[in-house]
Amino acid sequence: MWERISRRERLDLFIAWLAISFAFTLVFVREELVGKVDVPTFLIFFAIAAVTVGIGFVAHEMAHKFTAMRFGYWAEFRKDNLMLLFAVLLAGLVGVVFAAPGATLIYGSAVSRSENGKISAAGPVTNLLLCIPFVVLLLVAKENVLLLLGTIGLQVNAMLAAFNMLPVSVLDGRKVLAWNPAIFVALIAASFILVYLSLTRFFM
């Protein structure tokens, strides 16, 4: 599997991962510790965000990539420097992450509506599945660090799924809706329900 990820793709994933991790760190620090942030605390939040965003973001893009490859296409992730900069600035100024660091590009003959819908759905579905171990962690964890890891992991993956399921522009939701409206409704409903539950600390 590793040999199917080119050197350029690895670099693009790594840069996007760092930038999005930093953006999420700005949001979580802003929400949890307004006016009480020091360097060690910021680094702890960044490390947790890097792990949770790293899992969620990379798994999301790789789900697109390998689903496309199952249909016989070549696919690679490409970062968008402007969108990465915008994500960090928006997180710092407003406290919102606009998580569109790039896209997995598909190369080959014309992709059918069904294939495109399934490739697009693979990303959000992966994030929804990743919410499960973080929910379990929240239910069993006693230590504050583990509770924080579970909270951020759940929030990050729920937000990534919800954002990408919006039926606008080049986001996954638009292509899933064009393929299968019922699956679109199920995925976007599950995503936003998990976002709500994660923000209200329902599992704690």
Image (cartoon, rainbow, N blue to C red):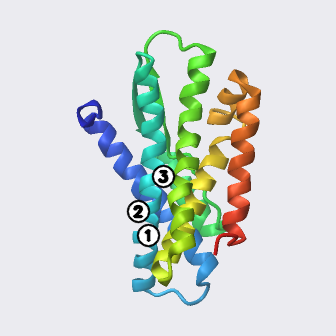
Asked if 202 appears above or below 120 in the picture, the reply is below
- Asked if the residue at tag 1 contacts the one at tag 2, i.e. Cβ–Cβ closer than 8 Å, the answer is yes
Q: Which callout, 3 or 1, points at the residue further toward the start of the chain?
A: 1
Count of labels shown? 3
Q: CA distance from mark 3 to mark 1?
A: 12 Å
Residue type at mark 3 is Gly
Task: Decide if residue 28 is in sight here.
Answer: yes
Instruction: Name the spot of residue 56 as percent of width and height, x first.
Output: 48, 52
Residue under label 1, please give it: 48
Q: Residues within 10 Å of mark 2 (few under 14, many from 20)?
A: some
Residue at the image position 73 percent from the left and 55 percent from the top: 193
Residue under label 3, please give it: 56
Residue type at mark 2 is Val
Query: 183 or 139: nearer the eye?
Result: 139
Q: CA distance from mark 3 to mark 2?
A: 9 Å
Element carrying mark 3: helix
Give the numbered dot on residue 51: 2
Residue type at mark 1 is Ile
User: For residue 32, what is the image quadrant?
Assistant: bottom right
Instruction: Name the spot of residue 73 as percent of width and height, x first.
Output: 41, 18
Element carrying mark 2: helix
Give the numbered dot on residue 92: none
